[in-house]
Image (cartoon, rainbow, N blue to C red):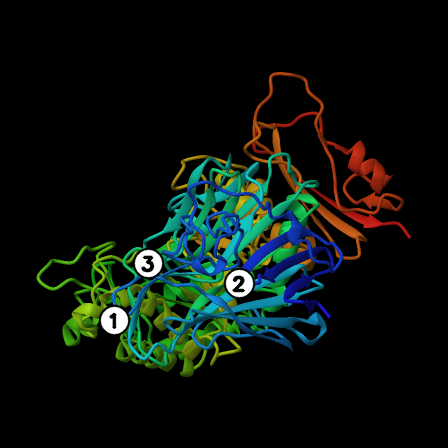
C-alpha cells in the first residue's frame, strides 16, 4: 500500500520518496515531510514548539501561545485567521467576510487515480499500482469545504495534487483564489529554477537563490505563455545533475497561472501553485463545486537528471492516450516556407514529390488553404476550402499525395478570427472585446470567446467537417496571439471574472470534441512556437512545436530548458535554411540535422531550391534519424553540459532503459584559440559493462566512458557537430 493512515498521520510512499501530514488535536492538517523515503512513523516532532511573539493563536487553543498557524506548516493554508503568508484560498462569503478555516472532516483511500470532470489530468495504467487519497477540510462556520486530492504513483515517484471546493453554505460565494497545492518546507536555504523567455526565446533557464519575501513567476496572457512556463524546481543550493535534493512542480493547466515561493522570517518556505488570482472572480452557488487544476509533484535526492527522467516517464506513459505517443512519428515537411499564402494544387504536388526525395513521410499544407485567405488580414475562422487554390478539395489533394507514398497534414488556428471573415460578419459578438472600446489586435486577428458554449459548438462542427471528409493524417493546431480585452457578451457584468478560466474550460471541451474523436490523426500543438507548452496540452497533443526559432544554436538553449520537465518526444524540432531567417546565422547542415534530432525531426525549407548534394544530405540524415528515433523517444535523457556554462560544446545523451545502448550528440559552440583537449563524459551506463563506439570502433567500459570520457576530434570548428552510437558488447 502506498498510502497509510495511523492516528491521523497520513503517509504517502513512492519507491524513493515519502510525503507525510498530520491532523492536530484541533483539526488542522499540518505538513510534516516531503523528501527521501523514510519509515512510516510520526515525525511531527520536527515542528518547533516555540512561542512566536505577536503571532495570533486560534481561539480553540485557549491559553496555548505556541500553537500558531502563522508559523506551522500546513497542507492547505487558511485565510484571514492569523496566517499571514500566501493563502491557499481567498473567497468572499455570503456575509461579505473573507474567512476560511478548513478543518479535517473525513478521508477516503481507494485504488487507482482520481480524475477531474472539467480539466485534464494524468491517468494510471494498471501496472502503475496508483492509489488516491481524498481528505476533506470543512469550515464549520460557513460549511464551505475543500477536497484535497492526492494521486500516488509509487513506481514513478510522482505524487499529484488537486483541490475541489464545494459550497454548502446555503448562499452563493465568490471564489477569488484557489491554489491547487500548498507545500511548506522547514528550510529556506534553497534555489529556484524557472524557465522564462519570449517568442523565439522560450524556456530559458534561470537559477537563483530564494530570497526573503515572495519569489513569483506566472502568466497573465490567457495562456501558459512564452514568458514563463508552468513548471518550476526548488532545490538545495549545491544540487546538480547527479546529486542533491530537488522538488519539481508541474501545473496541468494551459491558462493564467502563478507559482509562489515565500520565505518567511522564521527561515521557512511556502510554495503555492494555481490559477492566477488576477481578474479571477468565480461565483459558486450553493450546492456547486469548483475544480482546481492538477499539479505533478516529484522529489529527487539524486539531482536534476533523475527529476527529469521521472517527469519524462509520466508524460510519455500517463498523459496522452493517442496511439502515436509511443510509436514512430513521421518526418514531415511544411508548406509555409516555400509558399506562404500563394500556391495552387500543382505547386503543392510538385513540392510534395520533391520532398519525398528528402526521406519525408508527410507533406503538411499550412496557412492559406481556406476561405479568402490570401494574407493574414482575412479569412481566419472560415474553415471551408478555397476551391480556386485546392481543385477538388482537401480529400482530392490528399489522395494524390497518398499516391506518392506520403501522408498528408493540414494547418488550423481554430481559436482565432479575422474581422474580414464570414464568421465575424455573422457573429461579431463571438469575440472577446470590451463594450465601447476598440479591440486590441495581434496579427490582424481577434480571440474567439471560448467561454461561450455556442462558439465551442461551432468550432467543433467546423473543424470536424473538414476532418470527417477524409484524407487528413495530421493536424497542426496553431494559436498565434495572447488573450486581452477579456469581456464576454454571454455573461452578465458581475461574472466577467470567470471568463479567463471559462475560456480554458472551453478549449478543453473543443479538444475533447475534435482530438479525442479522431484517434487516427496525429495532432501537433503550436502557439507562435512554444507559447502553450504545458502538461495539460500534452494530454491532447503527443508533440508540440517547441519554438518558431529554428536556428540550431538557439535551439540548443531552448531544448535544454524544455528538457527539464518535458520529454524529447514532445518537442517539435525541424531543419531550416541558412542563413537563418531570424538570426542570420549560418550553421552546417549536419549540425542543424543533429540538433533537430533532439525532437520529432522535420523540415522548414523549400526543397525546390536545394541542390542534388543537399538533397542527398537530407536523405542521409533523415534515414539516420529514423534509425535513432526509438532510442531518442524512449531512452533516458542526460544533459551532459550546459549551454550557459561557457563551455566549448553542448552535449546530450540518450540511454536505453536497459542501459545496453546510447546516443551522444555534441555541438561545438565556441572557437578556442587554445589547443585544448575536449572530453565528453557520459552518464547512465553500466560501469562494469563494455560498449563499442560505432564511429571510432573503440570498446570501452562504462566506468571509463564516465570518468575519462570520449575524446573529441582535435580540429573543432565552431558549430561543427558529432554523434556517437554506443552498443553494449555482450
- Residue that carries the numbered disc 1 in the rendered image: 371
Residue at 42%, 39% in the rendered image: 213
Closer to the chain start, of discs 3 and 2, is 2
x, y percentage for residue 598? Answer: 59, 49
Closer to the chain start, of discs 2 and 1, is 2
Residue 43 vs residue 473, the one in the foreground = 43
Residue 35 appears left or right of 259: right
Closer to the chain start, of discs 1 and 3, is 3
Question: Which quarter of the figure is the N terminus placed in?
Answer: bottom right
Numbered circle sitting on residue 26: 2
Q: Under tag 3, what secondary structure? A: loop
- Residue that carries the numbered disc 3 in the rendered image: 222
Callout 1 touching callout 3 (CB < 8 Å)? no
Residue 481 vs residue 725, the one in the foreground = 481
x, y percentage for residue 563? Answer: 57, 49
Numbered circle sitting on residue 535: none
Specify the farthest residue to the front.
63
Residue 49 appears left or right of 53: right
Q: Under tag 1, what secondary structure? A: loop
Disc 2 from disc 1: Cα separation: 65 Å
Disc 3 from disc 2: Cα separation: 40 Å
Q: Under tag 2, what secondary structure? A: loop
Callout 2 touching callout 1 (CB < 8 Å)? no
Amino acid at each position: 500500500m502506498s498510502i497509510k493512515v495511523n492516528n491521523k498521520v497520513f503517509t504517502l510512499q513512492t519507491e524513493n520518496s515519502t510525503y507525510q501530514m498530520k491532523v492536530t488535536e484541533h483539526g488542522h492538517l499540518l505538513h510534516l515531510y516531503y523528501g527521501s523515503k523514510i519509515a512510516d512513523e510520526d515525525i511531527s516532532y520536527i515542528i518547533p514548539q516555540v512561542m512566536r511573539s505577536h503571532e495570533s493563536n486560534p481561539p480553540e487553543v485557549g491559553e496555548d501561545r505556541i500553537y500558531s498557524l502563522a508559523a506551522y506548516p500546513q497542507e492547505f493554508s487558511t485565510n484571514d485567521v492569523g496566517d499571514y503568508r500566501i493563502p491557499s484560498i481567498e473567497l468572499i462569503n455570503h456575509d461579505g467576510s473573507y474567512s476560511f478555516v478548513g478543518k479535517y472532516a473525513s478521508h477516503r483511500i481507494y485504488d487507482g487515480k482520481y480524475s477531474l470532470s472539467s480539466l485534464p489530468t494524468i491517468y494510471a495504467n494498471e501496472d502503475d499500482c496508483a492509489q488516491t487519497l481524498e481528505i476533506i477540510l470543512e469550515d464549520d462556520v460557513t460549511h464551505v469545504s475543500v477536497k484535497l486530492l492526492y494521486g500516488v504513483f509509487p513506481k514513478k515517484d510522482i505524487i499529484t495534487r488537486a483541490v475541489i471546493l464545494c459550497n454548502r453554505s446555503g448562499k452563493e460565494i465568490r471564489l477569488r483564489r484557489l491554489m491547487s497545492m500548498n507545500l511548506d518546507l522547514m528550510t529556506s536555504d534553497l534555489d529556484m529554477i524557472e524557465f522564462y523567455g519570449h517568442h523565439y526565446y522560450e524556456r530559458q533557464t534561470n537559477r537563483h537563490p530564494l530570497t526573503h519575501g515572495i519569489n513569483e513567476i506566472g502568466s497573465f496572457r490567457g495562456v501558459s505563455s512564452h514568458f514563463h512556463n508552468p513548471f518550476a524546481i526548488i532545490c538545495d543550493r549545491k544540487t546538480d545533475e547527479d546529486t542533491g535534493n530537488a522538488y519539481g512542480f508541474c501545473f496541468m493547466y494551459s491558462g493564467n497561472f502563478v507559482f509562489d515561493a515565500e520565505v518567511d522570517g522564521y527561515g521557512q518556505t511556502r510554495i503555492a501553485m494555481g490559477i492566477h488570482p488576477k481578474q479571477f472572480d468565480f461565483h459558486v452557488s450553493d450546492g456547486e463545486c469548483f475544480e482546481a487544476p492538477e499539479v505533478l509533484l516529484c522529489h529527487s535526492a539524486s539531482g536534476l537528471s533523475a527529476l527529469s527522467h521521472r517527469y519524462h516517464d509520466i508524460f510519455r506513459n500517463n498523459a496522452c492516450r493517442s496511439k502515436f505517443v509511443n510509436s514512430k512519428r513521421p518526418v514531415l515537411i511544411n508548406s509555409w516556407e516555400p509558399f506562404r499564402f500563394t500556391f495552387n494544387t500543382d505547386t503543392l504536388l510538385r513540392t510534395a514529390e520533391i520532398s519525398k526525395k528528402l526521406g519525408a513521410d508527410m507533406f503538411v499544407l499550412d496557412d492559406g488553404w481556406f476561405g479568402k485567405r490570401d494574407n493574414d488580414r482575412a479569412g481566419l475562422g472560415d474553415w471551408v476550402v478555397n476551391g480556386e487554390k485546392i481543385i477538388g478539395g482537401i480529400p482530392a489533394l490528399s489522395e494524390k499525395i497518398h499516391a506518392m507514398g506520403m501522408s498528408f497534414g493540414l494547418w488550423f488556428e481554430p481559436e482565432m478570427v479575422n474581422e474580414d471573415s464570414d464568421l465575424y460578419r455573422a457573429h461579431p459578438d463571438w469575440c472577446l472585446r470590451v463594450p465601447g472600446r476598440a479591440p486590441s489586435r495581434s496579427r490582424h486577428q481577434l480571440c474567439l470567446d471560448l467561454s461561450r458554449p455556442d462558439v465551442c459548438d461551432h468550432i467543433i462542427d467546423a473543424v470536424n467537417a473538414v476532418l470527417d471528409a477524409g484524407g487528413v493524417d495530421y493536424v497542426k493546431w496553431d494559436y498565434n496571439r495572447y488573450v486581452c480585452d477579456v469581456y464576454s457578451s454571454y455573461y452578465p457584468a458581475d461574472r466577467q471574472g470567470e471568463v479567463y478560466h471559462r475560456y480554458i474550460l472551453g478549449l478543453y471541451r473543443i479538444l475533447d470534441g475534435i482530438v479525442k474523436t479522431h484517434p487516427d490523426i496525429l495532432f501537433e500543438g503550436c502557439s507562435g512556437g512554444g507559447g502553450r507548452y504545458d502538461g495539460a496540452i500534452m494530454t491532447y497533443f503527443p508533440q508540440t512545436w517547441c519554438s518558431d526559432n529554428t536556428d540550431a544554436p538557439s535551439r540548443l538553449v531552448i531544448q535544454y530548458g524544455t528538457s527539464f520537465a518535458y520529454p524529447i518526444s514532445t518537442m517539435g524540432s525541424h531543419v531550416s535554411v541558412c542563413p537563418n531567417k531570424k538570426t542570420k546565422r549560418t550553421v552546417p547542415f549536419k549540425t542543424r540535422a543533429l540538433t533537430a534530432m533532439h525532437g520529432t525531426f522535420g523540415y522548414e525549407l523549400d526543397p525546390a531550391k536545394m541542390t542534388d548534394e543537399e538533397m542527398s544530405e537530407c536523405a542521409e540524415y533523415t534515414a539516420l534519424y529514423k534509425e535513432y528515433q526509438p532510442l531518442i523517444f524512449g531512452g533516458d535523457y542526460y544533459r551532459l553540459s550546459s549551454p550557459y556554462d561557457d563551455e566549448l560544446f553542448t552535449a546530450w545523451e540518450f540511454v536505453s532503459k536497459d542501459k545496453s545502448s546510447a546516443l551522444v550528440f555534441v555541438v561545438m559552440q565556441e572557437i578556442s584559440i587554445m589547443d585544448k583537449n575536449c572530453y565528453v563524459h557520459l552518464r547512465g551506463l553500466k560501469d562494469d559493462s563494455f560498449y563499442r563506439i560505432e564511429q571510432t570502433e573503440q570498446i570501452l567500459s562504462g566506468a571509463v566512458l564516465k570518468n575519462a570520457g570520449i575524446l573529441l576530434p582535435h580540429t573543432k570548428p565552431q558549430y561543427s557537430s558529432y554523434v556517437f552510437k554506443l552498443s553494449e558488447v555482450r
